Amino acid sequence: MPKVVLAGGTGFVGQAFARRFQERGADVKIISRQAPHISWEDPKAIVEALEGADLLLNLAGRSVNCRYTPENRRQILNSRTETTRQLGECVLACHRPPALWMNSSTATIYRHAEDRPMTEQGGEIGTGFSVDVAKAWEEAFFAFNLPATRQIALRIAIVLDDGGVMAPLRNLVRFGLGGAQGSGRQQFSWIHMEELFRIVQFLQEHPELDGVFNASAPNPVTNRELMASLRRTMGVPIGLPAPRWLLELGARLIRTETELVLKSRWVLPERLQRAGFTFHYDTLDKAVEEIVGRMRSR
């Protein structure tokens, strides 16, 4: 029975992955601040869970769906870097360390890009708070010298599934507000939840692969195309656009940041495709149709 340790395994992606691993017969251990899982305050239990594990997958991190106040910035950064450092120390303490450690990162590490796509080799790292967090996160991860443990950082695009960002987007479309947001030209890089899980499996099965990988679908779309796809799938013919000033006002009212909508994330999975990974959900329409159909059937 393969042994999988999910750090931060009670979040949006963690719950979906725990279910999928368990369905495939894996022994899944979850590290979380929520009982009854292994506590972050119990390093001995974490080391015990990691002993002989086939995979450690770290998904821990405070949600960025908030206002970037000084306190929220501190929590967003520390929830990523400190948990990564703690896991690294626990891996070092193992007699039989995990064969593979995958750590979340984010496609937001690249600059705002409307001119060309960003790849692992040719992408340009951006500036600003979110980029600083992403850089510090990866630096904390790769600071460890772990000769017995392969390390992969996943620069994950926006994950689409039943829940997460799809819920508010569907509500906007349902109430006739599903038009372009801002200029509508900003690129939207995304990945279907099932595809993200398949990427993790693929990387597990290829021991020659390590380092940084973009976990994103090969066909990003503009924000305008994203909203049009949702309207088509949901059968809503029109959607009012939301200019930047209105988004700024709305973001303040619901205590979030417009960066989540307005930053142009144009990311391509170059290394995955070169390694032979094939995408089942390679277009947004395929992904949206599957997810919306599943949400309707509930």
Image (spheres, rainbow, N blue to C red):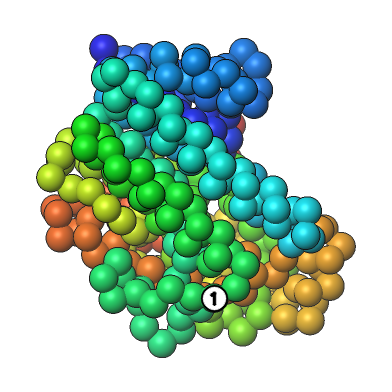
Which residue appears farthest toward the right when viewing the image?
253
Which of the two residues, 63 or 283, is positioned nearer the viewer here? 63
Number of labels in the image equals 1
Which residue does the image show at 50% across and 44% down from the upper left? 161
Q: Is residue 152 above or below residue 179?
A: above
Q: Quadrant of the C terminus?
A: top right
Image spot of residue 53 (x, y percent): 31, 21
Where does the N terminus fall, quadrant-wise?
top left
Q: Residue at x 48, y 41 (%)?
A: 84
Task: Write the residue at 78% across / 66% down.
Answer: 251
Tell me the SS state at disc 1.
loop
Q: Amino acid at mark 1?
A: Thr
Q: Does the rendering let one see residue 116?
A: yes
Residue at the spot of label 1:
127
Residue 52 image point, x, y percent: 28, 18
The one of 266 and 79 positioned closer to us in this rendering: 79
Q: Is residue 182 above or below residue 87?
A: below
265 with respect to 296 (left or right): left
Left or right: 142 as drawn, with respect to 274: right
198 horizontally vs 165: left or right: left
User: Can you say whether 212 is above or below 261 in the image?
Assistant: above
Q: Residues within 10 Å of mark 1 (few under 14, many from 20)?
A: some
Residue visible at 58% across and 80% down in the picture: 184
Residue 296 in percent (x, y) is at 58, 40
